[in-house]
Image (tube, rainbow, N blue to C red):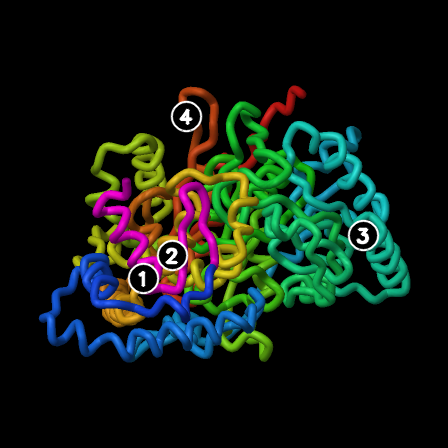
Amino acid sequence: MTNFSTKRFYAIAAACSLSFSLGSFVSKTLVDSPVTVSVIKAAEQLSGLSFSAAQEDSLLNGSNDHLKAYEELRKLNLKNSIVPALNFNPIPVGFVYPDKTGQFLLDKRSIATLPADKNELAFYTIRQLADLIRNKKISSVELTKFFLDRLKKLNPKLLAVVSYTDDLALKQAAQADAEIAAGHYRGVLHGIPFAVKDLLSAKNYKTTFGAAPYKDQVFDVDATVVKKLEDAGAVLIAKLSLGELAMDDTWFGGRTNNPWDLTRGSGGSSAGPGAAVSAGCVPFAIGSETWGSIVEPSNNCGDTGLRPSFGRVSKYGAMALSWSMDKLGPMARTVEDCAIVFNAIQGKDPQDLSTIAAPFNYNEKQNSLKGWKIGYLKADFQSKYPNRHNDSLTLVKMKELGATLIPIELPKLPFNSMNFILDAEAGAAFQELVLTHRSDLLQRQEKAAWPNTFRTAQFIPAVEYIQANRVRTLLVQNWYEKLKGLDLYLSPSYSDNLLLTNLTGNPCVVLPNGFTTKGLPTSITFMGQLSGEGKTLEAARIYQNATGFQLKHPALNF
């Protein structure tokens, strides 16, 4: 016998033109089952509203009209690549760009020699590898083969690769060698191998989103990020795993493992980039973050990652999870590596209307924090959390380096109650999975996993989504005003700050700051002003060079 709660649930589903069976979620046309007063009453409870009997009766015509409109629009079967006619703009009123002009300055020094043990190349930085290539101490083809071989050797344990791009890579590497031999050197990335998270399209190669429903999907375009890197002369060698549809580290090929401890996952959702960079299988990789997907695997695997400001890097050719929160950024060995890659991929793109043109000023010769005003989230650093000891040492080191530390607090606005913005956008991005049963093909089916999040999202009222984004406007303005006068600020890698800044669009650099008692890496985040990547990277690099945690690598005894 069906109880009241089940009746109410079915009624709400009917109101949304959806139907449930006992074990699965089913799409169903319900134009012959119109919305009734009982459905309206159930929907009121779902939305926390209350209307009179007369008002409920008056809602019937409009609700049934909406239902017919939903059915008509769903027939279009929108692709994930179609963006809404709405753009999130993170720029607050009165905003002044932190960098007045754009200038990218690297030290011209020659820093690398070919190691006696070629395996040491696995952990060379981009600058070191570039120096070897530029001075013709090693060819791009040799280097590409080295990293491809290493990736193939270690991947059976890491499960970090979705697709190898051998043919393309060797062709690009040969072209790089020919250009360099002819005196046409494109810059630091010329001939350097790299990989991308498999939510970025590469022409003629599968782009699987890490999810079984899309494992044979091929796009006939290169993502803008891929094209920019190839234009800089970089060599694409692989497409790396992500937790399915950018959640956690489990994909249709299994769980991507942490090179420091194979019994642990590498962290999501940029799982493959995190593991591959950490294990020395690729000099750098492109990851993405919506809410922690660069921060978590960088923390777990001891990498250095840059999550740029919202809009600084084009998302054209990338899987959409949340149009107003998705960001693409590099994961690498060092802060300097991240700066090099960011310089190549940042900038406005006419194919991505959310991109923002902003100056990027980075000076590698900046080597002192004296006179810098750097905030820190005092309450967060003083709370009891796993990495408190290492983080406290980071604060001490920053003072030793000359920084003036200024305590700051998170905004009082209820931003933790705004996380359903992500749910709503993800539910729209993957509604077709819900309507066609294909969400059943995803590996994870627990309550907190995407299938149920997508289903629940179908019941988020458009009005509440818009209201949350209006509060987001207040949040962006509030945080901008609070950070005025600071060069940047520090935060534990895991705190409420992570959601806050993914909503406001502020950039962060996450980098190693020590190890746990079990020998696993820990991290700290350097948080920037909006479009303040330059100073954030400079400060993080100065700290990194003074501590040296990036020089330690997993033993890889497998």
Q: Amino acid at mark 4?
A: Thr
Taking the spot 33% from the left edge, 37% from the top edge, the residue there is 391
| Residue at mark 3 | 169
Q: Residues within 10 Å of mark 1 (few under 14, many from 20)?
A: some
| Residue at mark 4 | 516
Q: Residues within 10 Å of mark 2 (few under 14, many from 20)?
A: many
Residue segment shown in magenta: 1-27
Residue at the left extreme? 52
Where's residue 4, x and y in %? 21, 47
Measure how far apart labels 2 and 1 are at the Cα level: 9 Å
Quarter of the view holding residue 19: bottom left
Res. 322 visible in picture: yes
Helix, strand or loop at label 1? It is loop
- Disc 4 versus disc 2: nearer the observer: 2
| Residue at mark 2 | 423
| Residue at mark 1 | 460
Taking the spot 27% from the left edge, 79% from the top edge, the residue there is 61
